[in-house]
Image (cartoon, grey):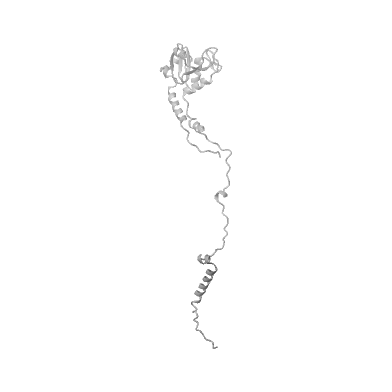
Amino acid sequence: MPRIALPIALPTPALIPALAAAVTIAGLAAASPAAAAAPATVASPAVTSPAVASPAAASPTVAPDPGGVTLTGADVKRARTRNVQLPAWKIAVRYALDKQGTPYVWGGTSTSGYDCSGLMLRAYQAAGIELPRVAAAQYGAFSRKIAWEDLRPGDLVFFHGLGHVGMISRPGHMVHAPRTGDVVKEERLDAGRRSSFVGAVRPDPKGVKRWAHIRELRQAPPPAMPVATTL
């Protein structure tokens, strides 16, 4: 039989790359529908970067200073008031109370023994105030007299016609050297003392206001303080 030649239209050279791309895509779609649906991505090569240590890991742990000093609220209060001078009456009261147990010695003015006015003499002398030697002269040395209802710590109180003197140590109490055979001690101001009371004087009137200011400072709450360490 004779051969019949059919005319075949060949693609032009410009269409060959497009047809090749279409065939490739069709082949991929036939092999994997999921792959055909997902967009093609190009995997980048893995890049190894040098390890960078975090600041916490890089910083060494600092041990606490064993020589550190912690300041407490009480330390702050002492620091704020240590240079404030105590009033004379406060010093005198402390002096007299510290001598409790010392024997009474008539005419005594030392730690080996005191009489009533000798104890007052040395107590206020320790505070920088000079008093006369005997009780009657101590009473007469101050023009201002203090009533029983107005007694305050540090006041000198006189009894038995100015024959005996003591010092108010706290409200309702006095410290004194009572009599032969007894010792310096603090006693309550009872009705018997009230009946023999002659009068009182205040050797340090300005000290009362000054001490009130100091007490106000000490009662104030201490400020918050950080922990300080010595270098």
Residue 34 x, y percent position in the rendering: 52, 65
Q: At 50% from the left edge and 75% from the top edge, which residue is drawn?
A: 19
Q: At 44% from the left edge and 24% from the top edge, which residue is drawn?
A: 208
Residue 28 x, y percent position in the rendering: 53, 69
When asked about the image quadrant of residue 47, the answer is bottom right
Count of numbered marks? 0
Q: Kindly tell me whether residue 146 is visible in this rendering.
A: no
Depicted 82 relative to depicted 137: above or below: below
Front position in the image: 53 or 156: 53
Q: Residue furthest front?
A: 1
Depicted 199 relative to depicted 57: above or below: above
Front position in the image: 187 or 177: 187
Front position in the image: 193 or 33: 33
When asked about the image quadrant of residue 146, the answer is top left
Front position in the image: 1 or 223: 1
Q: Kindly tell me whether residue 93 is visible in this rendering.
A: yes
When asked about the image quadrant of residue 230, the answer is top right
For the C terminus, the image quarter is top right
Residue 56 x, y percent position in the rendering: 55, 48
Q: Residue furthest top?
A: 161
Depicted 23 relative to depicted 50: above or below: below
Q: Residue furthest bottom?
A: 2
Residue 202 x, y percent position in the rendering: 44, 19
For the N terminus, the image quarter is bottom right
Depicted 202 relative to depicted 30: above or below: above
